[in-house]
Amino acid sequence: MKRFAHMFDDWSPKDYNNLLTIFLASVFGSLGTTAFMTWITTDGQAMAWPERLLLSLGATIIYGAIVLLTFYIFSPQSRPALKRLLTRQD
């Protein structure tokens, strides 16, 4: 336990910010995906496999968008990389 606690002594505030951003991105992404899937499946009807596939694809896109947005907001140092990723510039 001491070795694990000692690891955090060497971290900078930037490292803590990155860890917090990863945590928030996973929480917000999961919440968004859960809300979307709950909203789509509220009628309780059985779905065919193409509908389930589209639902999963939509949930994955929502999760990714929320993660990108969270990193854009809470991690300012990652903004240039995200802009290059989204605009496909070298």
Image: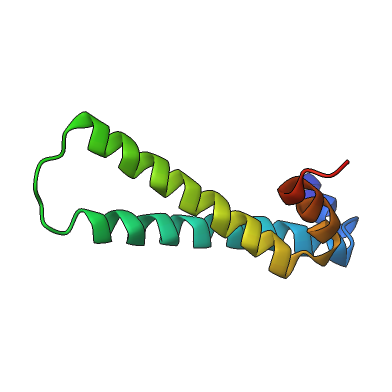
Closer to the camera, 45 or 9?
45
Number of marks in picture: 0
Q: Nearer the viewer, residue 62 or 74?
A: 62
Answer with the quarter of the image where residue 72 lies. Answer: bottom right
* Residue that appears at 11% across and 57% down: 43
Q: Where 15 sits versus 3, above or below?
A: below
**In-front residue for pair 60/10:** 60
Q: Residue furthest top?
A: 49
Horizontal side, residue 84 vs residue 43: left or right? right
Residue 51, above or below 44: above
Describe the colour scheme in one phrase.
rainbow
Q: Position of residue 74 (x, y in %)?
A: 72, 68
**Quadrant location of the C terminus in the rendered image:** top right
Q: Is residue 7 above or below residue 48?
A: below
**Can the viewer see residue 1 in this picture?**
no
* Percent coordinates x, y for residue 32 in the rendering: 43, 61
Question: In the rendering, at what x and y percent does residue 29 appear?
Answer: 50, 56
Is any part of residue 70 visible from this angle? yes
Q: Nearer the viewer, residue 90 or 56?
A: 90
Where does residue 86 sit, x and y in percent of width and height? 71, 50
Query: Is 7 placed left or right of 56 in the picture?
Result: right
- Please name the residue shown 55% across and 49% down the image: 64
Q: In the figure, is residue 44 to the left or right of 54?
A: left
Question: Which residue is depicted at the point 64% across and 63% down?
Answer: 70
Which image quadrant for residue 35?
A: bottom left
Asked where in the image residue 21 lies, by quadrant, the reply is bottom right
Q: Residue at x 69, y 60 (%)?
A: 71
Left of 2 or right of it: where is 61? left
